[in-house]
Image: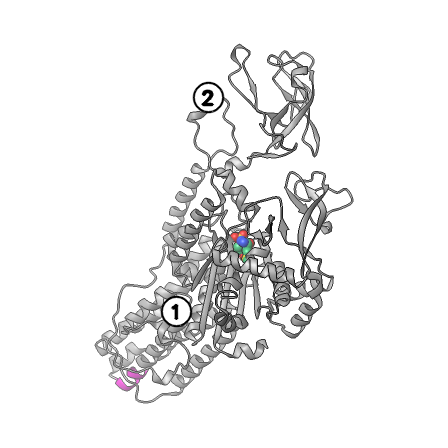
Amino acid sequence: MNTAATKEKVFYLTTPIYYVNDVPHIGHAYTTIAADVMCRYKRMQGFDVFFLTGTDEHGQKIQQSAAAKGLTAQELADRTVLNFKDLWKALNIANDDFIRTTEERHEKTVQAIFKKLLDQGDIYKGTYEGWYCVPCETYVPESSIGDEKICPDCKRPLQVMQEESYFFRASKYTDRLLEYYENNLKAIMPRARYNEIVSFLRSGVHDQSISRTTLTWGIPVPGDDRHVVYVWFDALINYATACGYIDDPEKFRKYWPHVHHLMGKDIIRFHCVIWPIMLLALGVTPPVTVFAHGWWTVEGEKMSKSKGNVVDPFKMVELYGRDPFRYFLLREVPFGLDGDFSEAALVGRINSDLANDLGNLLNRTLQMIESYCGGVVPAAERQGPLEEEIEKFALATLQDVDDRMADFAYDEALKTIWAFIRRGNKYIDETMPWKLGKEGASEDLNRALNTLYRILHLSALLIAPFMPDTAVTFWHQLGYDDDPQARGLAGFDWAAVTSGQKVRKGAVLFPRIDMAVWRKEKDARDGAKKAQTPPVASLPEDDDSKHEPLIDIDAFSTLELRVARILGASEIEGSKKLYKIAIDLGYEKRTIVSGLKEYRSPEELVGKRIVVVTNLKPAIIRGVESNGMLLTAGDGKEGRLALLTPDEDVPLGSRVR
Ligand code: MSP
């Protein structure tokens, strides 16, 4: 069915919907730029395109992150969504729709799908039982637990927990999905990911828990609003919502058979196992292709907030311009592989590929058309063998780019386009128009300049999806007033590129960046950035804290604060101030040393619920190892010191945020 369908010129492409607990970074920009380039390309090939992006706004992550910022989840979503929308403007993303999972159209669709699957018996109510990590507040899959039953993340003991949950009968459809993949070898790309998913499916898929009673920030399960729909079950449905699954069946019929999903490699199990099974259960065809791209590191290191090396796409646009940034991301690394981002590499590509190859071809050609032909493109009387070869090269380039784009091989498509551009520069050296000009060989000169003009004409069209602004400027300099993207690539005819246009040589497209100057500026920027990094988790010691530098929420969240109960307090030999205090965190017992002796007797302390910093490095104090610190308030003068205690009976080990 897919093979026949893809012959129609309809194309539906999605990005993941991004979580609103984070500011947009290079990873988000990467997928969205890739999707934008593909959609622009398809439009130029005459496809009817629907391009969707959006935000994922429900779930525990968002609820917690909002609470930590003192906002409601909706407020956090309403703020962060603007960052994403602004970034898409800054990057020139031409999406057709933007979906937010808190929109009514989406809630309606999720509930309708849930109800349909429930009614047909593919969703059932059961009890979820699993190994739960209290500190991490998450179930840990059996497959990642060893004999010692500790959490793979925080290394603390796990507990068996039970919770009522709705389940999706995913196991029922595994064989049908495997059959679909066996018949559709491009349904998951690249091939390594296809193999990974197929072998995962062969090992069997469990029914999936798809509701939660432990949080409220989600879409209520229809008819049972003690439960909210699990965030991934909710999020995946966005692709159907925006395509009109409930609201506009005609739209859905038109675009759905042509749906392609782009995303990073970390989330393909959801997209290549759960989502297609949901679709099969609904009687809908799985996606034509799910393409998983690689991950970016930054100058050889994993990108992380704590390292302070997160690449801000707004900053890159401001420093280098959006087209070079778009070009670099897609040219530097094959789309399915991991890559390393460095500004030095970006500058290198600006100087070599953009300034040298592309910029020079345009400038040299327009300069010669001005010098020798008064700025008017000359007609060529007949083609020579060299021109015939160039024409063949041009047509082969078009075909090759089309083949590469069909496989999401952006880097290969760009290499092909640049081989053509370089062929143009070589043609200048071969024909030496300045020599022909001097010799008065006007027929040869006209033929060379006319051929160069055709090369530029086609180059402008080919780069348009990747660098839309550049293509417009380029096109304008070629003497055209229309939009190169509207001109399109479908039915491109080399012979139909005519003469007579008045070229308009303008500003240099990509001025070369002086590496020495750039290095100095970059070092200054890096130095300034280091100076701004807040001190991590330095707790104010007294009231002078009012004058401490402000920290951001990330610095605060490096602190792990938890509720504990005091089991006992005993004296430490030779110390007038300190107690050795035994505490219970629910998931473990610890000893801490604290200077409470002047303020409380051991009897007053036993049984008290307190707040403890649990991720302090252990310290030996008066020969006793202290693993944490309890929180107090007050200056301790005149025997006055308050222990911080929770005012509700929350479980031991609960995180304080
Ligand atoms: N909300 C889910 C997706 C739901 S789709 C129904 C989600 N959101 S996310 O905001 O955390 O991540 C979105 C995308 O960013 C993922 O595709 C992920 O692979 C990508 N990236 C995050 N860091 C990345 C890099 N360092 N490099 C490249 N892409 C990376 O997951």
Measured along the vertical axis of the image, is residue 174 above or below residue 101?
A: below
Q: Amino acid at mark 1?
A: Ala
Q: Position of residue 370 (x, y in %)?
A: 24, 74
Mark 2 crowdedness (10 Å alpha carbons): few <14, some 14-19, many ≥20: few
Task: Determine crowd level at label 1: few under 14, some 14-19, many 20+ residues with C-alpha closer than 10 A.
Answer: many
Q: Which numbered disc covers residue 449? A: none
Q: Residue 5: which quarter of the image?
A: bottom right
> Horizontally, is 160 left or right of 76 in the view?
right
For image coordinates 61% across by 17% down, the residue present is 595
Which residue is located at x 56 percent, y 57 percent? 111
Residue 543: image tag: 2
Mark 2 or 1, which is nearer the eye?
Answer: 2
Q: Position of residue 299 (x, y in %)?
A: 51, 51
Q: Regarding mark 1 in the picture, which secondary structure is present there? A: loop
Quadrant housing residue 371: bottom left
Specify whether residue 297 is painted magenta.
no
Q: Residue furthest bottom?
A: 382
Label 2 – label 1 distance at C-alpha = 59 Å
What is the x, y in percent for residue 567?
70, 23
- In the depicted view, which residue is nearer to us: 292 or 132? 132
Q: Which residues are magenta?
A: 441-447
Say if residue 617 shows up in the picture.
no
The quadrant of the rendered image in which ligand 1 is seen is bottom right
Q: Quadrant of the N terminus?
A: bottom right
User: Which comes sooner in the sequence, label 2 or label 1?
Assistant: 1
Magenta highlight: main SS: helix
Quarter of the image where the C terminus is located:
top right
Disc 2 residue type (three-letter): Asp
Tell me where residue 347 appears, x and y as whole percent: 42, 56
Determine which residue is flagged by label 1. 464
